[in-house]
Amino acid sequence: MQPAISRSPLIFQIVGYKNTGKTTLVCRLTERFKQAGYKVGTIKHDAHDFQVDTPGTDTWKHQAAGADITAITSSVKTAIIKQQPEPLDRLIEQMTEADVILIEGFKAASYPKIIAIRSAADYELIQKLSCPLAAAVWPEAGSPAAANPVVPAIDINQIDQLYHMLLSLPKQN
């Protein structure tokens, strides 16, 4: 399958409780979309105050001095650091070149979701969230039969199956 021609990217969320494999799933789906020639953007929500810049670097010094926004660019990449939270929709708007955007977290957002399920207790998340597409299930989670017969359960290691399911969905606006 070839990358989308449309200007609107495909947007999907990967959600779940802590240590359910969300980051691994985002990375594996990113690799799969990249293999197919898509430009992929990723967005990560962190519930804690993360540290992205290494202490002692020039950009770290800029931030430590009180800069509200710091940008750095080189011949191969660019990064922007802001000292404020950014709404999900604003982050998405900044990914104009992406064909696909994979969002890790932001459970309350209303984009189509793959829910990572590592234990039987995690199945209840399917009923709590909007727009569930599928459950990416670890073998130790047990049978999903009673959890939600409408949301398909796919083995978390079946990346091709998840990839093809995402591509088969109607285009989002």
Image (cartoon, rainbow, N blue to C red):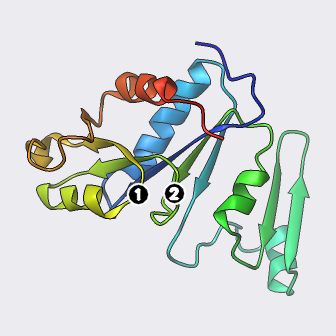
Q: Helix, strand or loop at disc 2?
A: loop
Tell me which residue sits at (41%, 27%) in the image: 165
User: Label 2 vs label 1: CA separation?
Assistant: 6 Å
Which label's residue is closer to the chain start, 2 or 1?
2
Q: Which mark is residue 29?
A: none
Residue 151 lies left or right of residue 38; in this view the side is left
Residue 121 in the image: above or below residue 160: below
Residue 161 lies left or right of residue 57; in this view the side is left
Visible residue check, residue 58: no
- Quadrant holding the N terminus: top right
Circle 2 packing at 10 Å, graded few (<14), some (14-19), many (20+), is few
- Quadrant holding the C terminus: top right
Question: What's under tag 2, amino acid-wise?
Answer: Ser
Residue 83 in the image: above or below residue 161: below
Could you tell me residue 133's position as x and y percent?
A: 38, 42
Circle 1 packing at 10 Å, graded few (<14), some (14-19), many (20+), is some
Instruction: Report if the CB atoms under discs 2 and 1 are less than 8 Å apart.
Output: yes
Could you tell me residue 74's position as x and y percent?
A: 90, 47
Visible residue check, residue 111: yes
Tell me which residue sits at (86%, 86%) in the image: 65
Tell me which residue sits at (15%, 40%) in the image: 139
Question: What's under tag 1, amino acid-wise?
Answer: Ser
- Quick one: 76 or 117, which is closer to the camera? 117
Q: Which residue is mark 2?
A: 110
Q: Which residue is mark 1?
A: 130
Residue 122 in the image: above or below residue 153: below
Q: Quadrant of residue 38?
A: top right
Residue 105 lies left or right of residue 20; in this view the side is right
